[in-house]
Image: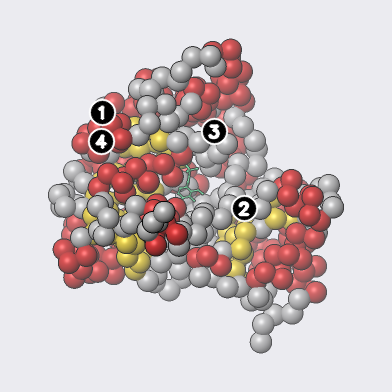
């Protein structure tokens, strides 16, 4: 059978190493996983209760219109229902947007070291990903992206702009004035859509950050995605939220599978969105954890990138795979990010205080065992 080279050469998304696999391979029972930016507090108690009640209805198909969930998001975001839709994780929303708006041979644009789901979905749809280099400090360079679009958009048929804000794995963000300048150039431009992926927006502490929901109200070509996987603690259920122009919402609702988001996921999401106590506790533990990591990484003498997410990227200044493996032997799973071009960096998610301390202790031991690169 003939298969296109784009499909044959696809490199699948590389998730964090599972706890059970590490236990098996290294013969250890206590394993700390700080590798997938998950919520260390577990599942929101309100979401758990909602799921327990809905379990007895699993003989029925889920609501294909997401009536309750869209209603809750519409209330929270102060937007009409027809500007909101839901995906099986925000991953699915990115995939659908690319399939809907790009023909094979056309393009999307994003930053260097952007979240890897966009180029993977693009390649699967035979769409080219244009990558714009970061600024110093591993920051997204929207001014350079705007220039790139001015020069190449028509020629390369670039249809979608993906702006992860904050980005993963870098943890950096785009300050509001830079977003404003970009939107002055490209807002309301009817030949491109600008997607702000705000998976970590709730964790941001930077004063000059602004979520893009207001921009979405102001500009006809702005889309915002959020996820239930991080602060809301529902990564295993797969729910992504999207706000955008009515046409984009309508097209996604036509192309997506009617039952793309299962019933337990829908009821859990409605409950988790309202669990303000769980949200507050998650923010507190995340900020405390980040501050602890910064302090300890300084003591360890390795550079890190200040993060607006629930994780931190740091430079081990050593070949990363031996460090990663040595950490595994000590029961600590962090995340190498070689696939983003970082040969000596690791990404470490914030866990419970006990998990954070275990990770730092293991790092201290490993750094003594493996010297810095010359
Ligand atoms: C920047 C970014 N966007 C989106 C996602 C995906 O979220 P979801 O679980 O909703 O697919 C992640 C997950 O790690 C992420 O880091």
Is the residue under label 1 in contact with that under label 3 (CB below 8 Å)? no
| Residue 16: mark in rendering | 2
Is the CB atom of the residue marked by disc 3 within 8 angstroms of ligand 1's nearest atom?
Answer: no
Asked if residue 61 shows in the view, the reply is yes
Asked if residue 183 shows in the view, the reply is no
**217 above or below 347?**
above
Q: Secondary structure at mark 1?
A: helix
Is the residue under label 4 in contact with that under label 1 (CB below 8 Å)? no
| Residue 237: mark in rendering | 3
**Distance of label 2 from label 3 (alpha carbons):** 17 Å
| Disc on the earlier residue, 1 or 4 | 1
| Disc on the earlier residue, 3 or 4 | 3
Q: Which residue does the numbered mark 4 point to in the structure image?
A: 251
Q: Where residue 76 sits: x, y (%)?
A: 38, 29
| Disc on the earlier residue, 3 or 1 | 1
| Disc on the earlier residue, 2 or 3 | 2
| Disc on the earlier residue, 1 or 2 | 2
Q: Is residue 250 left or right of residue 191?
A: right
**Distance of label 3 from label 1 (alpha carbons):** 24 Å
Q: Which residue does the numbered mark 1 point to in the structure image?
A: 82
Q: Secondary structure at mark 3?
A: loop
Q: Indicate which label's residue lies in the foreground, 3 or 1.
A: 3
Picture quadrant where residue 105 is located: bottom left
Q: Nearer the viewer, residue 299 or 315?
A: 315
Q: Where residue 42 sits: x, y (%)?
A: 64, 35
**Distance of label 1 from label 2 (alpha carbons):** 36 Å
Is the residue under label 4 in contact with that under label 2 (CB below 8 Å)? no
Quadrant of the rendering where the N terminus is positioned: bottom left
**Distance of label 2 from label 4 (alpha carbons):** 33 Å
**135 above or below 179?**
below
């Amino acid at each position: 059978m003939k298969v296109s080279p784009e499909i044959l050469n696809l490199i699948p998304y590389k998730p964090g190493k599972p706890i059970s696999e590490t236990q098996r391979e290294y013969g250890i029972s206590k394993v700390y996983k700080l590798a997938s930016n998950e919520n260390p507090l577990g599942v929101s108690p309100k979401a758990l209760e909602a799921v327990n009640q809905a379990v007895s209805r699993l003989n029925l198909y889920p609501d294909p219109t997401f009536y309750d969930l869209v209603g809750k998001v519409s209330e929270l975001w102060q937007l009409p229902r027809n500007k909101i839709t839901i995906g099986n994780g925000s991953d699915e929303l990115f995939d659908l947007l690319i399939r809907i708006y790009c023909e094979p041979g056309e393009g999307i644009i994003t930053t260097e070291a952007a979240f890897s789901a966009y180029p993977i979905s693009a390649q699967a749809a035979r769409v080219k990903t244009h990558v714009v280099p970061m600024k110093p400090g591993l920051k997204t360079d929207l001014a350079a992206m705007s220039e790139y679009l001015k020069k190449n958009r028509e020629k390369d048929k670039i249809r979608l702009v993906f702006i992860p804000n904050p980005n993963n794995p870098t943890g950096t963000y785009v300050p509001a004035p830079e977003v404003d300048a970009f939107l002055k150039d490209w807002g309301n431009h009817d030949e491109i859509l600008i997607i702000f992926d705000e998976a970590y927006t709730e964790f941001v502490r930077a004063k000059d950050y602004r979520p893009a929901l207001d921009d979405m109200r102001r500009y006809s070509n702005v889309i915002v995605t959020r996820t239930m996987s991080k602060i809301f603690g529902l990564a295993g259920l797969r729910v992504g939220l999207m706000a955008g122009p009515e046409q984009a919402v309508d097209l996604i609702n036509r192309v997506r599978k009617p039952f793309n988001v299962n019933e337990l996921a829908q009821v859990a999401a409605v409950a988790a969105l309202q669990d303000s106590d769980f949200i507050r506790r998650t923010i507190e533990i995340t900020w405390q954890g980040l501050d602890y990591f910064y302090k300890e990484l300084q003591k360890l003498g390795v550079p890190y990138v200040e993060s607006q997410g629930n994780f931190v990227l740091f430079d081990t200044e050593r070949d990363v795979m031996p460090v990663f493996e040595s950490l595994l032997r000590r029961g600590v799973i962090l995340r190498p990010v070689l696939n983003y071009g970082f040969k000596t960096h690791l990404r470490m998610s914030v866990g419970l205080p006990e998990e954070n301390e275990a990770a730092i202790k293991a790092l201290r031991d490993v750094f003594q065992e493996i010297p810095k690169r010359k």
